[in-house]
Amino acid sequence: MSATVVRGLQPPAQVLVTGASSGVGLAAVRQLLAHSGVTRVFAVSRHASACEALRTLAAQAPLQLVLLDADLTDEKALSALARQLADQTDALHLVFHAAGVLHEGKLQPEKSVLQVNASSLQQVFAINAFAPILLAAAVMPLLGHDQPCVFASLSARVGSIGDNRLGGWYGYRASKAAQNQLLKTFALELVRHNPKACCLLLHPGTVDTPLSQPFQKRVPASQMFTPERAARQLLEIIAQARPHDSGSFLAWDGTAIAW
Ligand SMILES: NC(=O)c1ccc[n+]([C@@H]2O[C@H](COP(=O)([O-])OP(=O)(O)OC[C@H]3O[C@@H](n4cnc5c(N)ncnc54)[C@H](OP(=O)(O)O)[C@@H]3O)[C@@H](O)[C@H]2O)c1
């Protein structure tokens, strides 16, 4: 991986990763722990402290990795998370927000408008659209310093309205499009508070994780990334990000995606 994850990500860089218990988020935690500039990684998911992979990493690096349990759809849990972070650091240099959902229990992406219902829309919007901006609000006091920092949030190409040619997946598509608008707006505000900051919306490509697992049949092997490769590619984009990139919606290879 590149020598600097974020420009200026020098010790004692403090990093927050959500979605840390699985897929792209877990791979990012591993890579950030191995980075010489990163002093501490706060790893968040609903069940981070019970996740075997995270527990093993924490046992190997007890001072560097902090496991925090938080349901990011719960405002009280977000407030508690903000307090826990503020107790332990006065600055974050990278937020890598990878928590998201496509299917869970009864929640499945819709093939037809006849499958659209209010409770599924609320569930998918709560984590994919509302959680990113509520997280941004919760950590804002830790981003307004005078050093470079990046707030990077995983979106999805299917959230692009301009690129929607296939239809289907109403709730997931719309929740990612809503996330894009909310964080584009945040990106403009963030740089007013910290001119060295940057907020990015990133599409990781199709990645072999529990999220994509039921939908992998038609994806050619050459287009399926491992979580490790996806995390590395995204961290490389983050490393190159500059404040004038704030508010961009970028694919894994750095190309811009239509809104
Ligand atoms: N995989 C792909 O092909 C693909 C493609 C495009 C975009 N993406 C996006 O990339 C991101 C990461 O996806 P992934 O494939 O790595 O997914 P994943 O392996 O299913 O991991 C999702 C993570 O989100 C956490 N999470 C879910 N709901 C949460 C909640 N309410 N509060 C806190 N954490 C929650 C999960 O942990 P807990 O269950 O412990 O809470 C888990 O760590 C998502 O935003 C996804 O939409 C993925």
Image (cartoon, rainbow, N blue to C red):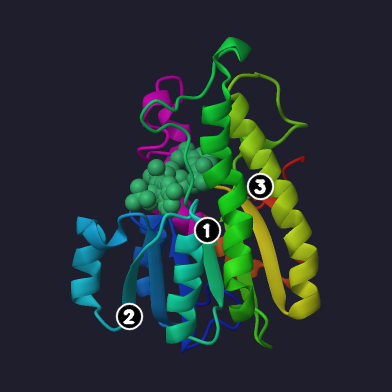
Q: Is residue 46 above or below residue 191?
A: above
Vertically, is 243 above or below 73?
A: below
Within the magenta stretch, is there residue 17?
Answer: no
Identify the residue at image location x=40%, y=80%: 40
Give the CA separation, mark 2 to mark 1. Answer: 27 Å
Q: Amino acid at mark 2?
A: Gln
Element class at badge 3: helix
Residue at mark 3:
179
**210 drawn magenta:** yes
The answer to whether residue 206 of the structure is visible from this angle is no
Amino acid marked by disc 1: Glu
Work out whether residue 167 or residue 120 is closer to the camera in this orientation and state it.
Answer: 120
Q: Are marks 3 and 2 in contact (CB under 8 Å)?
A: no
Quarter where residue 210 is shown: top left
Residue 231: x percent and y percent? Answer: 46, 56
Q: Position of residue 76 (x, y in %)?
A: 48, 62
User: Distance of mark 1 from mark 3, alpha carbons?
Assistant: 17 Å
Spatial CA span between label 3 and label 2: 30 Å
